[in-house]
Amino acid sequence: MLGGPQSTTPPMSCYRTVDSTGTDIAGADVPYQIDHALATKMYSTMAALQIVDTVFYEAQRQGRFSFFMTSAGEEATAVGSAAALTIEDTVFTQYREHGVMMWRGYTIQQMAHQCYGNILGHGKGRQMPIHYGSKELNFHTISSPLATQLPHAVGAAYALKLEEKQACVAVYFGEGAASEGDFHAAVNFASTLSAPVLFICRNNGWAISTPSTEQYRGDGIAGRGPSYGIASIRVDGGDARAVYNATAEARKIAVANSCPVLIEAMSYRSGHHSTSDDSSRYRTADEMNRWRARDPVMRFQSLLLANDWWDPQQEKDLRLSLRKEVLKALEAAQKEPKAPLSDMFTDVYKEMPWHLREQLEEAMAHVKAHPEACPSDIPVR
């Protein structure tokens, strides 16, 4: 027999270049070196992500907007992989990868506008907070239902193949989403269509309150790849340099051979699932503290310090300036008005079709007859 509980086949190894303290692992293969400029940008982006998460989370708790999710513990997975992509590559994410958008140029101010749901935000308040998107950055708008982005990503990758573009699609998801049928359909389509797509799984140990030990049997998520004919790798998701190298090599393979590649980034969700969750109810403080001691951002900082690329004054200046920028962005976003009621029916069709026109007229008539039905901060026009 092959596989099963009595299998003697060893699990797939985990690629890493530094240990949990950030110390270099002797003999680690690092084919894609990170220079001073790239390392500094990666670290600055991860630091910005940490501060955005902290301040935005506090803002939600103050009732300034309705919902938020952090990337605590997974900063290296998002930024390390994003740094290995090009702006021509198309990105689909789940909901915990805003570091990818920040790397590609999405500003903190844009994030604040979106979370407040004001007239300047992406979607104009017609989506939940953190559901970012940007056509200019080749970043498809986030969708709440798990795994729906996976088949879409394969379709986008197949389109790149037909257009003979030297680019690929990167699609992010969690190990919980890999239990959805859309995951299996997507990887099978990608394999049979030879679509240049990178499946990047954030295995952070928890699908809300369901631990990965109850999520699957067998050799994790990367272990599924070979069964679908897909090249696969498991990487330490807290090691930004390892994630960067794994993604750079995966992208090279996907573009050169027009084929999918599966990356499983092993990490840990240090924060709550969302502002609607209290993870202390299903995991111990000791477990969380042990993982928080392996902060991916500090592990990467060790690389900068070892090369004399960073010092305490730079650290202090960076975090102070970032906090000021984040607070300023939130203050500016809070002052912007909401989109008018009529915008609920726009931005889908170039010209509004008759059925949406009828719905718009009905909505306006209803609000005119019942003013209390429309929130006071929504302009009725």
Image (cartoon, rainbow, N blue to C red):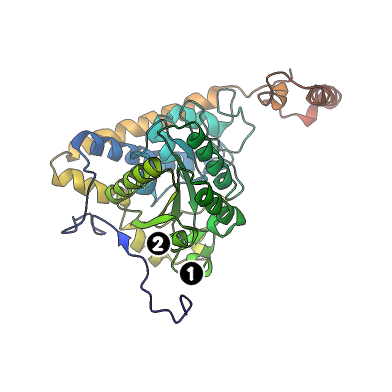
Count of numbered marks: 2
Name the image quarter holding the C terminus.
top right
On the image, the x and y values in percent for residue 278 come to 53, 57
| Position above or below: 333 against 189 | above
Residue closest to the eye, 1 or 75:
1
- Residue found at x 34% / y 56%: 235
| Position above or below: 82 against 26 | above
On the image, the x and y values in percent for residue 377 come to 67, 25
Q: Which mark is residue 283?
A: none
On the image, the x and y values in percent for residue 193 come to 53, 46
Look at the numbered disc 1 and give the secondary structure of its residue: helix
Amino acid type, mark 2: Met
Residue closest to the eye, 67 or 309:
309
| Position above or below: 175 against 39 | below
Give me the C-alpha separation between circle 1 and circle 2. 17 Å
Is residue 176 found left or right of 53 in the rendered image? right
Is residue 164 found left or right of 76 in the rendered image? right
User: Could you say which quadrant of the image residue 255 lies in?
Assistant: top left
- Residue found at x 25% / y 33%: 317
Look at the numbered disc 2 and give the secondary structure of its residue: helix
Does label 1 or label 2 sit earlier along the sequence? 1
Q: Which mark is residue 288?
A: 2
Q: Is residue 265 visible?
A: no
Amino acid type, mark 1: Thr
Q: Which residue is mark 1?
A: 213
User: Could you say which quadrant of the image residue 341 lies in?
Assistant: top right
- Residue found at x 18% / y 55%: 24
- Please tell me how crowded label 1 is: few (under 14), some (14-19), or many (20+) other residues with Cα within 10 Å: few
Q: Is residue 362 visible?
A: yes
- The residue mark sitting in front, 1 or 2, is 1
On the image, the x and y values in percent for residue 157 come to 50, 39
